[in-house]
Image (cartoon, grey):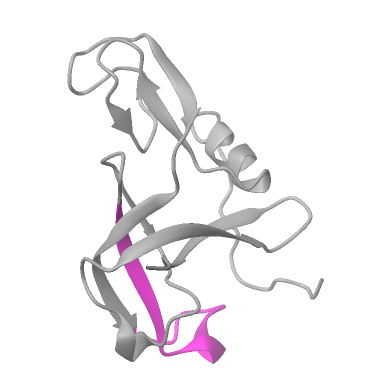
């Protein structure tokens, strides 16, 4: 594995299960046991029914490209990558997640494109969730 030189997100107690799941190549989201609503980021109380009875559960990893942009600005750690895409994916379970679309030329990105999670093992301790076009 080549050294990953970009900034790496750091898990906090509220997001640890999400990052642990990513390392296992599972997309983990918080789900309310009271009403079944999914959410990301994690919160102690369901925003739909206010229940505090929650669990982390494996999501499907499927969604649609909700919105995207192409970054041309040369931020530290990413200057050699530009231009690159950043994307907001609406998961089939409902929450939206910001990530990147990989394996698809930027010119081919389209809102409502079906996508699925892929996992980028950037270090021994960190895996990032990215998305790619879902096969038809």
Does 82 lie within the magenta span?
yes
> Which image quarter: residue 33?
top left
Residue at 24% of width from left, 77% of height from top?
110
Residue 58 on image: x %, y % = 50, 33
Is 55 positioned to the left or the right of 41 in the image? right
Quadrant of the rendering where the C terminus is positioned: bottom left
> Which image quarter: residue 36?
top left
Residue at 58% of width from left, 47% of height from top?
10
Please provide the residue range marked out in magenta. 71-90
Residue at 30% of width from left, 17% of height from top?
45
Q: Nearer the viewer, residue 135 or 92?
A: 135
Q: Residue furthest right?
A: 1
Q: Residue furthest front?
A: 136
Is 104 positioned to the left or the right of 121 in the image? left
Residue 81 on image: x %, y % = 52, 87
Residue 78 on image: x %, y % = 52, 81
Q: Give the answer, above or below, for where 44 lies relative to 28.
A: above
* Number of callouts: 0
Q: Residue furthest left?
A: 48
Residue at 35% of width from left, 26% of height from top?
43
Does 15 lie within the magenta span?
no
Residue 86 on image: x %, y % = 36, 72
Q: Give the answer, above or below, for where 22 lies relative to 69.
A: above
Quadrant of the rendering where the N terminus is positioned: bottom right
Q: Nearer the viewer, residue 82 or 115?
A: 115
Is 115 positioned to the left or the right of 110 in the image? right
């Amino acid at each position: 594995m080549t050294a990953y030189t970009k900034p790496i997100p750091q898990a906090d107690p509220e997001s640890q299960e999400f990052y642990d799941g990513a390392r296992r190549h599972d997309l983990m989201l918080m789900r309310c046991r009271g009403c079944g609503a999914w959410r990301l980021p994690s919160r102690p109380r369901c925003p739909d029914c206010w229940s505090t009875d929650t669990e982390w559960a494996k999501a499907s990893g499927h969604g649609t490209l909700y919105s995207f942009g192409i970054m041309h600005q040369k931020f530290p750690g990413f200057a050699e990558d530009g231009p690159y895409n950043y994307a907001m994916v609406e998961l089939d379970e409902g929450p939206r997640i910001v990530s990147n679309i990989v394996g698809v030329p930027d010119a081919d990105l389209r809102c409502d494109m079906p996508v699925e999670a892929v996992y980028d093992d950037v270090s021994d301790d960190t895996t990032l969730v990215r998305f790619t076009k879902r096969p038809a």
